Image: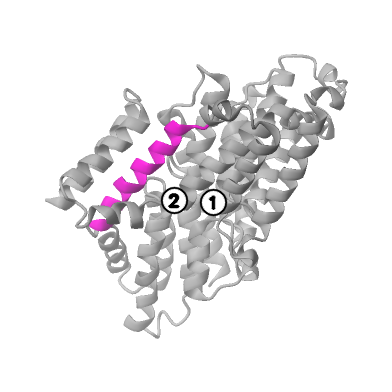
C-alpha cells in the first residue's frame, strides 16, 4: 500500500509538472505532505534528516544572494561584453566558448554555482546583440551536467563512487573526461544544426563590439568588491575538499558577506530576489523521491537490473549505464547512486571470476548517473535553477517542461549512445 502511494504521488507530480497547470512548488510540497500524512515514512523526521539535501538547499540560497548582490555592480555585463569581444562577434565561436567554459567550471565547481554565475553573463551578452538566449540556456545547462562528469568533484555521484571504489581525481580525469569532452562537442554541434535559425543577430554586432567596457560598470567600488568575492568563491570551491568545508557553508558565507559589504541597507530587497519558489520545489521533490527510496523501490530496481544481466559482464555494463541515465533523468541521482553502489559491490562476491574488475562498472554508473540529468527539466539541480533564472530574468518568457523534454531526451540519447560505445571499446 505504501509503495503504491509513493509511486502514485511521484507519477502525479510529474504529470502536473508536464501539464504546467499548477505551480511546481505547490505540486512538490503537496506531494511531500501527502506522503508524510499517510505514513509512508516510518519516522517522519527521517524524511527531513535523511532525504532532504540541505547542502543543496543552503548552497542555492547562498549563491542566489551572492549573484543577486554582485550583479548590481555591472560585473556580468562587463564579462559578457569582454567574452563577446574575445569571440570577435562570431556567434558560433561565442556559443562554443560559453559552453566549454561552463563545462570546465562544472568540473571543478558545483554545477548549480556555475549556472548561477554564467547565465546572467550570457543574458547580458544576448541582450547586447539582441539574440534569443534560449539556445544558449540549453547549451549551458547541458554543458554543466556533462562537465560535472569529468572529475571526482564535478558531481556528487562521482564523489560517492570514488569513495566507495577508492578511485582518485586522476582516475576520473583519465576515464570519464575524454568521453565527456566528446559528448559536449557532439551535443554542441547538434544544437547548432537544430537551432541554426536562432543564431541571427538582432542588431549590427559591430556596434556592440565598439562599446567601452568601462561603461558596463555601474559602481567601481562595488565592481572591485564583486570581482574580489568572485575570485574568492572560485578558490574556496576549488579547494573545498582540502579545506574540509561543505559547498553550502562557502555559499552562505560569501552570500551574506556580499550583502554586508555592498547592500546592507537593502537586505530585504536582496532577500526578495532569492528564488524561494525553487527552494520550496527542491524541498518537496527531495521528500517525494525519498519516499521511493523509503519503500525500497530504488533498491528493487537495482537488483532487477542485475538479474536482467544474468551474469554477463558486457550486458551488465550496458544496463547500468543506460538504465542509470534514464532513471537519473527523473529521480535524483544521489539516492539512486547510493542504492546502486552496494549492488555493484556485491557482484564480486556473487561471481568473483566474471566480476574480478569492477572499474568499468563504476565508470558506467558514473556516466549514466551524471549524464542522465540532461533528460528532463528536473533531472539535475542545475536544470531547475537555470530555467528559474531564465524565467526570473525575462519575466513572461519561460522554457516549458515539454520543450525541455524534447531537447533533453535527444541530448541524453546522444550521450548514452556515445558513452556506451566508449565503454564497449575502451574496456574490452
Q: Is residue 183 visible?
A: no
Few, some or many residues within 10 Å of mark 2 (<14, 14–19, 20+)? some
Q: Examine the rendered structure and indicate whether residue 370 appears above or below residue 363.
A: above
Q: Image check: 96 left or right of 397?
A: right
Please give the residue where the numbered disc 2 appears in the rendered image. 54
Secondary element type, mark 1 = helix
Residue placed most toward the observer, 39 or 143? 39
Q: Is residue 199 left or right of residue 292?
A: right
Q: Position of residue 306 (x, y in %)?
A: 31, 68
Residue at point 25% right, 36% down? 12
Report x, y in % for residue 144: 59, 45
Magenta stretch, main secondary structure, is helix
Q: Is residue 355 above or below residue 372?
A: below
Whether residue 156 is visible, yes or no, is yes
Q: Residue at x 72, y 26 (%)?
A: 125
* Position above or below: 97 against 368: above
Residue on which disc 1 sits:
248
Question: Which secondary structure, mark 2?
Answer: helix
Q: Residue at x 53, y 18 (%)?
A: 395
Q: Which is nearer the eye, 148 or 248?
A: 248
Determine contact: label 2, label 1, CB under 8 Å.
Answer: yes
Q: Position of residue 29 (x, y in %)?
A: 31, 37
Where does the magenta region start and end?
Answer: 274-294
* Residue at x 40% of width, y 68% of height: 341
Q: Is residue 180 magenta?
A: no
Q: Residue furthest front?
A: 265
Number of marks in picture: 2
* Disc number for residue 45: none
Q: Position of residue 138 (x, y in %)?
A: 56, 34
Label 1 crowd bin: few (<14), some (14–19), many (20+), radius 10 Å: some
Mark positioned earlier in the residue sequence (2 or 1): 2
Amino acid at each position: 500500500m505504501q509503495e503504491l502511494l509513493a509511486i502514485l504521488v511521484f507519477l502525479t507530480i510529474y504529470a502536473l509538472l508536464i501539464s504546467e497547470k499548477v505551480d511546481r512548488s505547490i505540486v512538490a510540497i503537496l506531494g511531500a505532505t501527502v506522503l508524510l500524512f499517510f505514513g509512508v515514512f516510518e519516522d517522519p523526521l527521517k524524511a527531513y534528516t535523511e532525504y532532504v539535501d540541505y547542502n543543496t538547499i543552503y548552497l542555492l540560497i547562498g549563491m542566489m544572494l551572492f549573484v543577486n548582490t554582485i550583479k548590481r555592480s555591472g560585473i556580468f555585463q562587463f564579462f559578457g561584453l569582454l567574452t563577446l569581444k574575445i569571440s570577435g562577434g562570431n556567434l558560433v565561436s561565442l556559443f562554443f566558448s560559453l559552453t566549454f567554459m561552463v563545462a570546465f567550471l562544472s568540473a571543478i565547481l558545483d554545477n548549480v554555482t556555475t549556472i548561477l554565475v554564467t547565465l546572467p553573463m550570457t543574458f547580458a551578452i544576448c541582450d547586447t546583440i539582441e539574440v534569443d538566449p534560449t539556445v544558449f540556456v540549453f547549451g549551458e545547462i547541458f554543458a554543466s551536467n556533462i562537465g560535472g562528469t569529468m572529475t571526482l568533484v564535478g558531481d556528487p555521484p562521482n564523489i560517492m563512487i570514488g569513495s566507495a571504489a577508492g578511485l582518485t581525481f586522476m582516475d576520473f580525469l583519465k576515464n570519464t573526461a575524454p568521453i565527456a569532452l566528446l559528448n559536449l562537442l557532439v551535443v554542441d554541434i547538434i544544437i547548432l544544426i537544430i537551432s541554426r535559425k536562432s543564431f541571427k543577430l538582432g542588431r549590427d554586432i559591430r556596434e556592440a563590439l565598439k562599446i567601452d567596457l568601462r561603461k558596463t560598470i555601474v559602481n567601481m567600488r562595488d565592481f572591485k568588491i564583486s570581482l574580489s568575492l568572485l575570485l574568492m568563491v572560485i578558490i574556496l570551491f576549488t579547494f573545498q575538499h582540502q579545506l574540509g568545508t561543505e559547498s553550502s557553508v562557502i555559499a552562505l558565507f560569501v552570500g551574506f558577506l556580499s550583502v554586508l559589504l555592498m547592500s546592507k541597507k537593502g537586505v530585504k530587497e536582496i532577500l526578495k530576489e532569492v528564488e524561494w519558489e525553487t527552494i520550496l520545489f527542491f524541498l518537496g521533490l527531495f521528500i517525494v523521491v525519498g519516499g521511493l527510496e523509503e519503500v525500497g523501490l530504488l533498491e528493487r530496481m537495482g537488483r532487477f537490473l542485475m538479474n536482467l544481466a544474468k551474469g554477463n559482464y558486457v550486458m551488465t555494463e550496458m544496463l547500468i549505464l543506460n538504465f542509470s541515465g534514464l532513471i537519473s533523468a527523473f529521480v535524483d541521482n544521489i539516492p539512486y547512486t547510493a542504492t546502486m553502489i552496494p549492488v555493484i559491490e556485491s557482484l564480486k562476491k556473487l561471481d568473483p571470476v566474471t566480476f574480478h574488475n569492477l572499474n568499468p562498472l563504476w565508470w558506467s554508473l558514473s556516466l549514466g548517473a551524471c549524464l542522465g540529468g540532461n533528460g528532463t527539466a528536473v533531472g539535475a539541480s542545475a536544470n531547475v535553477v537555470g530555467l528559474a533564472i531564465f524565467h526570473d530574468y525575462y519575466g513572461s518568457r519561460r522554457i516549458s517542461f515539454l520543450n525541455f523534454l524534447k531537447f533533453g531526451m535527444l541530448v541524453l540519447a546522444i550521450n548514452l549512445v556515445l558513452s556506451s560505445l566508449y565503454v564497449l571499446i575502451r574496456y574490452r
